[in-house]
Every structure is written in C-alpha cells, then in structure tokens.
Image: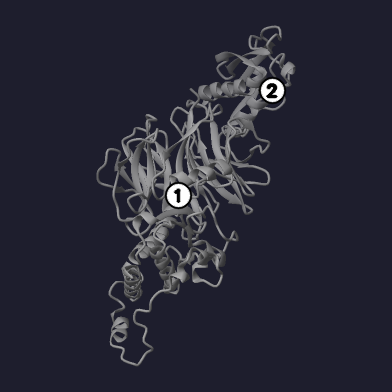
Amino acid sequence: MRKLFTVAFASLILAACGSQPPAPEQGGAKVEDRKPAAIKVEPQPVTTVTPVKTDDYSVAMLKDPKSILSKRSVFFDYDEYVIKDEFKSLVEAHGKFLVVNGQIKMLIQGNADERGSREYNLALGQKRAEALKKMLILLGGKEAQIEAVSLGEEKPRCTEHGETCWAQNRRDDMLYSGEF
Amino acid sequence: MKKSAFPGLLAALLLCASAVTDAQLSIEITGAGANRQPIAIADFAGENIVAKALTSVLRADLERSGLFRLIDGATEPLTDTAAVNYPDWKGRGADALVAGNVTSAFSGSDGRYETRFRLHDVQKQAVLGGQTYVSSAAQLRAAAHRTADFIYEKLIGEPGIFSTRIAYVVKSTGRYELQIADADGMNAQTALASREPIISPTWSPDGTRLAYVSFEAKKPIVYVHSLATGQRHVAANFKGSNSAPAWSPDGKKLAVVLSKDGGSQLYLVNADGSGVTRLASSTGIDTEPQFSGDGQFIYFTSDRGGKPQIYRIPADGGEAQRITFEGSYNVTPRLSPNAKSMAYITLNNNGRYQLALMDLATRQTQILTDSAKDESPSFAPNGRMIIYATEVGGRGVLAAVSSDGRVKQKLSVQAADVREPAWGPFLK
C-alpha cells in the first residue's frame, strides 16, 4: 500500500512538472497556463487515487506490445535536453515500473545526431540521459537503480543525413536488467 | 554494471595485437607548398637486390611532404662515395642530390642489408651529411623513412615526421577497428577490433600506449592499450559516461571526462586508473581536454557560456579563461607542439564545420580547409601538418593539411569509413 501511495504521489509531482516551463531560459513565461487549470470546477469523472494494478507493471509488460512499457525511447529537439510533454505518460509509466520493481535496474542511453564533434555530442547525449534519469527519480526511481550514460552520435537509429533522420537520433533509450 | 560488462566484452571483442590488415590507407596528394625545393634522388647503387625498396619510399616521402620537387630522370645509380658532377646536377635544376648504395650486409645469411647515403648541396658543391643503416628486409621501409627524416631536417630545418605513425578508426558494416599505420599509410595493423564504436584514440607521449574510448560494454569506458603487448586495462569506468582521454606531457596521468557526479566534467586520473580527482566544476558541459605541451594549461570545450566555446584552465586548477569568441560553435582544441597555435573545429555561418588554426598570441584565426564536416584534428609532432577527419562523397576519410593551409593530402580506405585520427609522437 505504501508503495502504491508513493506511485500516486510521484505522478502528482510529475503532473506538477508538466505545467512547468520546458526550459530555464523561458522561466516565468507560462504563469497563466497554470492558474485556470488550478481553479477548474467542471464535473469530472472521479480520478482520485486509483489503485495501481501491479500486474500492469510486471516484467512481462516490458516486452508486451500492448503495454506502454514496451516503448522505450524519448526524443528531443535540436540542441535540447528537455523531456517534451508528449513523452510524459511514457516516462511516468517507467517511473511506476521502477517503483514496483525495486530490484530491477535501468540503463538510460542518451544519443545525439551526427553534426559536430563526437565528444561534444557524447556530452549532449549525457545531458539527455541525465534529464530523463532526474525525472524518473522524481517519480520514485532510486539513484542506485538508474545509470545514465551516453552513446553520443555513435549509434544512430537512422543513418541518412537530414532532419527527419536526425530527429530519430536525438533520443534516450531505456534498457532494463538483462538488456544491457 | 561492472559485472555485467564482462560477458559483453568477451563476446564483442576480437583482440589481435599485430594482425596486418588488408585495408591499406592510400594517400593522395591534393595540394603542395608554394616554393618546393628541387631535389634529385639518384637510384641507389645495388638497390636492385631489394627491388628499389629504398628510393621508391624515399621519393614518395619527400614528395608527399609538399616541400620538395623531385628532379626526374635521376636513374643512373650513384654510390654514396662517387664523385659528383655538381654543374651537371645544377644544369638539371637540382638544388640538392642524394646518392647511396645498398649492400647485402652479412652475405645474406640473415638477410640483412646495409644502406649508406650522402646528401649533397648542389649550389654549394658540398656534402651536407650522410648515414648508414643496417636493416632486415622487413625494416627497409623504416630505413627509407629515416633517410627521408635526415634529408628533411637538413634541408627544411625542422625534424621530419616520416618515421612516425598514425592511429585511426576504420568503420565497416558492424565492425570497428582501431588501426595503426606508418605515416605513409603502409603497414596498417589492427590493435583492437570490436562490434561497438571506438572513439578518441590518443598516443601516450612516448608512443608505446594508446588511450581510447570503447563502447563494447554498452557505455563509454576509457582504456589504456600497450601496443607492444596488446595488453590493456581500464583507466576510467565510473557510473555514467567516461570519455575524452588526454595524456599529461609526462605520460603519468590522463585528463578525462566523467559524468559520475552529474554532467560531463573534467577529472584527472593516473594512467593505471587510480587516484581520480576533479579538475574543474561547471554547470554545463566540459569536455575534450588537452594539455598544452609544457603541461601548464588544459584547453577544453565548454558550453558554460550557453554555446560550445574553447576555454583553458591552469593544469593544477583555477579560473577558466575563454579563448574563442567568434561564432556559436568552436570545439576540439588541439595545441601545436610548440604551444603557439591551436587547431580547432568551427561552425561557419554557411553551416560548415571546418578546421581552423588560431595564433594564440594574436588570436588571429585562419580556416585551413574548404570541406564541410571536419572533425578531430591532430598535429604531427613537428607541428607542420594537421591530420583530421572529414567526409568526401558521403564517406569518412582522413585529410592532412599543413599549418599554412597549402600542403594537402587525402587518406582513404577502400569501402570503409576512416575517422578519429591521432598522429603519434617522434620515434624514440
């Protein structure tokens, strides 16, 4: 039960994260967005603390195409390390998985597109991996559970030279124990 | 992580310390110096017993340097002690002449050869010097390179780099090889082959070891590899990423980039992997460290100011000083051996990543190439040439350019990408 509460609490934290400005340099710009959301009074289906079915977070789900947990990649904008809103439910699911499966370990591999210096791109990939790790820790994952590393531009998913391809290569991949 | 690295390591690796590879690096000369010295290399007397292995290598070396123009038709064998008809050679346009001979040194019992040569100044009608080398058949190329080094130093006034070696990574489908070849691209040997990427090879100052980053354990780990034995050890494998090794001038320490404390940051570690200490702290990316030749400074790339620029800090720690200001992307600082200039990669307004050279005293900068995807510059130990990786026709090749931008070479391997060049030190 305590575990479940942690999960629910973590998702609240994540919801709060979601309404924060995406990057430090845009700080303070989105205050209006947050207020209407806070005073919303329309009737809504009650979505309080729904108990999480731990079955949904079993290790088997990692390879079940019907489970969101089978999705392992988060993509980034050019020269950015901010986790975009569209990936938050995915990150949230993996955060819950780490909490439910406290013994399992995760390796996050950050990646960059091919432009520029290999070592600088390695550092960019590292920033992306660490951004994801930070969010997973906010969601209840433990420091000792998660390692953030970078493959830089060395392991591109797509090898054409152009933005559609580069966008696939600016990416974090989440690997679990036994997969690395 | 450390434990799980092992099976992967064994599966992914194929260590072959001295396997000669069939993928030779071929060098094409694409630009030469403005004032090339005319030199005649006469065929060495008796050289037919080694199929002219000496003079062909010697001529190619001097020609490739871009600083000499070979006088044609010097095919009459001329021994080292033969009287030289200086006016005749002057008439053929030669400023310098090399004469020599090759003899079988010990009656062929162990296949040793003695090479003797003399270098003549045709204008002054004088002998500038000569040398004698004894070598096995396999060492004849090395003897020719040493001959070229001698001639180069006498005529140009700085040490030659014909006896040096270069390290680089060859990528073919699903395979990465760390190779080492002579400076003329010959005798390529594979030091390490892996299914996972290998980047950032760098020579120890004494030329006996290479430090590099290998991804064989699904993350970047820094290794130090002894070339003579093929033995290697982990120099940095902390939680997170380990990369960008740079040797201290005494060869005892490595500057490395670690993310163990969060972010990519600079650390110092002993070459055996012990005693890690932090060098600098920033909230951004700090990477690509390199010691200045005198060991006083560490130059590095950092985005602490928002965009990647080059900075330096005193090697024993202290305030960072920004070095590059123009443009939004200046990376990979590499100091010339005399520490007077710095090669680096700059992103120009036209979207090209190009090799640039900065005079550190005046901060004047010159773009040395007309390519668009330059990476990973590395100085030859005499500071004359800079080797770097670039792309031609969608393929990774190496190129070398002189520090004045005039002499240019392209080094490629058939049907593979070549990248991550590192020019080795002078042969001791």
Residue receiving disc 2: B53
Picture coordinates of residue A126, whole percent (x, y): 41, 55
Q: Residue furthest front?
A: A1
Q: How many marks are shown on the rendered structure?
A: 2
Picture coordinates of residue B395, whole percent (x, y): 62, 51
Q: Secondary structure at mark 2?
A: helix
Picture residue at 39% right of the left edge, 45% below the top:
B238
Say which of B96 and B247 sits in front: B247
Picture coordinates of residue B132, whole percent (x, y): 59, 12
Q: Secondary structure at mark 1?
A: helix
Q: Which mark is residue A119?
A: 1
Q: Which quarter of the picture shows residue B341?
A: top left
| Image mark 2: chain | B
Say which of A69 and B283 sits in front: A69
Q: Amino acid at mark 1?
A: Glu
Residue B175 appears in view: yes
Q: Is residue B275 above or below residue A125?
A: above
Q: Residues within 10 Å of mark 1 (few under 14, many from 20)?
A: many
Say which of A96 and B222 sits in front: A96
- How far apart are the two marked residues, 2 and 1, measured between alpha carbons? 41 Å
Q: Amino acid at mark 2?
A: Ala
Q: Is residue B79 above or below residue B251?
A: above
